Amino acid sequence: MVSSVRKGQTSSRFILCKNAHGFSLLLHIVQKLTVTSSILQQVVVAARIASMHRLRCSTWLVGSLLVLGLNCSGSGGQKLYEESTGYSPDTLRSLLNTTLTGLRANAITRAVQLCSPAVVGITVTDEREVVYRDPFSSWFFDDPIFRFFFGEPREYRRRYTIRNLGSGFIISPDGYVVTNQHVIGENPTRITVTLVGGEHYEAELVGADPVSDIALLKLRSQSNRRFPYLRLGNSDSITVGEWVIAFGNPFGLFDLNAKPTVTVGVVSNTGVNFQQQGRIYRGMIQTDAAISSGNSGGPLVNALGEVIGVNAAIISTAQNWQGAGSIGIGFAIPINRVKFIIERLHAAGTLERNIDIGIRLGNLEQYAPGMGQYGALIISVRRDSPADRAGLEPGDIIIAIDGIRVRDSKDAELLLSDSIVGQRLRLTILRGGREQVVTLTVGKRRP
């Protein structure tokens, strides 16, 4: 007999029943439910039928049932990745049978168990050759007469290897992997991906976008193996304060026991915009889950095991980012933005960032202090530019781009710089005190 939960006490156990026969009947009910119904519908139906059979249960914990399954070996399809749509009764039943005895199991441990097989460690090798001269040669060889008699100074060549470590995660059964562009670098010589259990695969670079800091890899497998993969959630639906889990390979620890490390925290903030080393981080998810060197490229998942972001950056007290560790302020690229990027990388291998807009912006407080505190003032519009064709005029105030609020000209420039050639942007402007929406098609900069 399983002990019941005291009144008012919350628990991560599934269903605690005093009647063993009642629990068996409940499992039988779950087995009979249709595959097409959602998990929530299944729980509601099971509860109603159970009540008809007068099953005595001390508590029903519906939340735990909702996070029981993440099918990491699904059937694939035409899309590059699979979005989460709920889990089958078979997965639910399997997890009930295998984890019921684990009293320490909760939403976090189940999400870790389900997601870990699809998290990978990434090792990038970059071989370079450096040409240099004797540093003392400039004392003599700068003299043309000396060079006339003794010739040009001798050159020395040296080859060296740079290794970079990072994280990633598989998004499809045929082995596509998402990671950060700064993990891969500019011209990698070799990319090695380590799976849970220690298997090593060479990977090819499908495409990378330095601006968004996203790269897409493809595992090379001669056996046509179907890989475990993660489902991508919806980063627009996340809530500040909800639990999140960061997976990764900090400081290369993945190589020690061939499995990822896990840190847990909450969503601290959303919609954070900033630039770092030429990269544009837009709409970032802030979390206090520890993200350290080597965690870059790993997934940030919610308690349902759905990927909501890609770990990318931290604020650290370390100098020159050497041995940078977490101080509780980390950032992940929202997964909806990642979907947009990887679909284009998969199709073309790159994103056309050589854009042309055709406007010059300024801050309201500088050029029009009486016009308000928020927005970017259009100072000038170049003739026959994309902005001109969209109908923008000097004096217009941009207050939002694609629904994202614009605080000042720096904000607007960051959002516009993140666009690609051919992309259609919805600009919300103020003209003559009235709000309007203008559609601008991003052009390509002329040589």
Image (cartoon, rainbow, N blue to C red):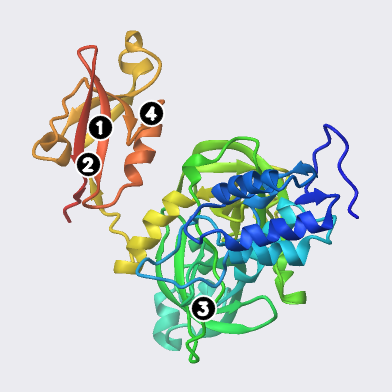
Res. 142 in view: no
- Which mark sits nearer the N-terminus, 1 or 3? 3
Looking at the image, residue 157 lies above or below residue 386: below
Q: CA distance from mark 1 to mark 4?
A: 15 Å
Q: Position of residue 61 (x, y in %)?
A: 72, 44
Q: Is residue 414 visible?
A: yes
Query: Horizontally, is 174 left or right of 71 in the view?
Result: left
- State the SS at label 2: loop
SS category of the residue bearing label 1: strand
117 relative to 420 in the view: left or right: right
Report how far apart the C-alphas of labels 1 and 2 lie in the structure. 9 Å
Q: Which residue was labeled with disc 3?
A: 130
Residue identifier under label 1? 360
Where residue 115 sits, quadrant-wise, is bottom right
Question: Pointers 1 and 3 in contact (CB under 8 A)?
Answer: no
Dots 2 and 3: beta carbons under 8 Å? no
331 left or right of 152 in image: right
Q: Quadrant of residue 305?
A: bottom right
Q: Nearer the viewer, mark 2 or mark 3?
A: 2
Q: Dot 4 surroundings within 10 Å: few (below 14), some, or many (20 or more)?
A: many
Mark 2 belongs to which amino acid? Ile
Q: Amino acid at mark 1?
A: Arg
The kind of secondary structure element at disc 4 is: loop
Q: Which mark is residue 357?
A: 2
How crowded is the residue under tag 3: few (<14 C-alpha within 10 Å), some, or many (20+)?
few
Tell me where residue 44 appears, x and y as whole percent: 60, 45
Residue nearer the viewer, 387 or 310: 310
x and y, in percent, of residue 50 in the image: 69, 48
